[in-house]
Amino acid sequence: MSKLSTQRLTKAFSGLVAVNDVSFNMEEGEILGIIGPNGAGKTTFIHLVSGILMPTSGTITFKDKDITYAPAHLRSRMGIARTYQLIHPLENLKVVENVMIGSVFSRGKSLREARRLAHEICAELGLEGLERDTTQLSILEIKKMEIARALANEPEVMFLDEVMAGLNSDETRQMIATIQRIATERRMAVGVVEHVMGVIRELTQRVIVLEAGELIAEGPYETVSRNPRVIEAYLGGAA
Ligand SMILES: Nc1ncnc2c1ncn2[C@@H]1O[C@H](COP(=O)(O)OP(=O)(O)OP(=O)(O)O)[C@@H](O)[C@H]1O
Ligand SMILES: [Mg+2]
């Protein structure tokens, strides 16, 4: 079943068209890769579907509902969550409090229930020491906390914007396994933006490729990675 889709979605910033006429679809339980060169529009696309930015034209559909202009807090309540490429932990709060925010403000949970849920999610991610200040966390722990914050919204669709960036190969492997397990257990659709193609190959069932805001290819990584246009636009340079 289609969870989230866009129809001819476009976002222009004055002269620059950052997302251009993109139609895509995400299915329940699917891990979808979103790849493309720097500035291709990947983060802008996530901003549009999560409601941080409003589109110039086109539509966004979540479970058959038109959510094109729904505010971000409503979308997170409906079940769309995302992490941020530029992370923004609230440094005067503890780890556990950072994770609780989503379920208190977006889901309306009591503090007690939000705390219980935060502990449960962090245990699932292998994130310990929840009473620490966020300034004490390693990069891996910060990335896990960002995912925990998204999961605290109890999403049906989640976007991860470069959560592996800065991790070493062991940590990356651990993160891949964690994301796969979570997606399967929760039957969640997960959109993954990554520049490391080994991660995309291992983690995703399907990939969309953006270049200068346009969707130029779509399919399993093995197919897309042989597409001459993709090689020219992205993989040639990345290799
Ligand atoms: N708020 C904004 N105002 C003007 N231009 C913007 C804004 N946000 C993004 N852009 C431009 O839109 C284009 C797409 O940017 P975006 O951040 O979505 O790319 P990206 O694919 O996520 O890149 P990266 O891989 O480097 O993270 C870029 O040219 C960027 O400079
Ligand atoms: Mg980006």
Image: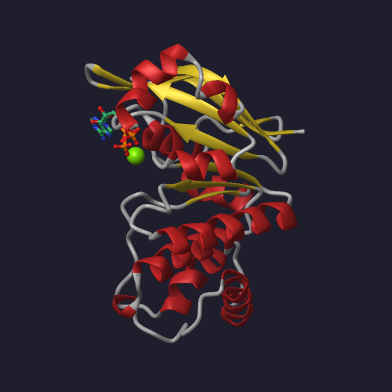
Above or below residue 35? Residue 104 is below
Q: Quadrant of the N terminus?
A: top right
Q: Nearer the viewer, residue 164 or 59?
A: 164
Q: Quadrant of ligand 1?
A: top left
Q: Is residue 13 left or right of residue 81?
A: left
Q: Nearer the viewer, residue 151 or 160?
A: 160
Q: Nearer the viewer, residue 213 or 225?
A: 225
Q: Position of residue 234 (x, y in %)?
A: 36, 24
Q: Is residue 69 left or right of residue 66?
A: left
**What is the quadrant of residue 90 in the picture?**
bottom left
- Name of the residue lying farthest toward the front: 239
Disc tally is 0
Above or below residue 196? Residue 226 is above
Above or below residue 67? Residue 214 is above
Q: Is residue 150 visible?
A: yes
User: Looking at the image, which residue is at 46% across and 67% down?
Assistant: 145
User: Looking at the image, which residue is at 48% across and 42% down?
Assistant: 198
User: Looking at the image, which residue is at 33% across and 57% down?
Assistant: 166
Q: Position of residue 38 (x, y in %)?
A: 29, 32
Q: Quadrant of the C terminus?
A: top left
- Name of the residue lying farthest toward the left: 15
Q: Nearer the viewer, residue 28 or 114?
A: 28
- Name of the residue lying farthest toward the right: 1
Q: Position of residue 109 (x, y in %)?
A: 61, 70
Q: Position of residue 53 (x, y in %)?
A: 38, 36
**What is the quadrant of residue 219 in the picture?**
top right
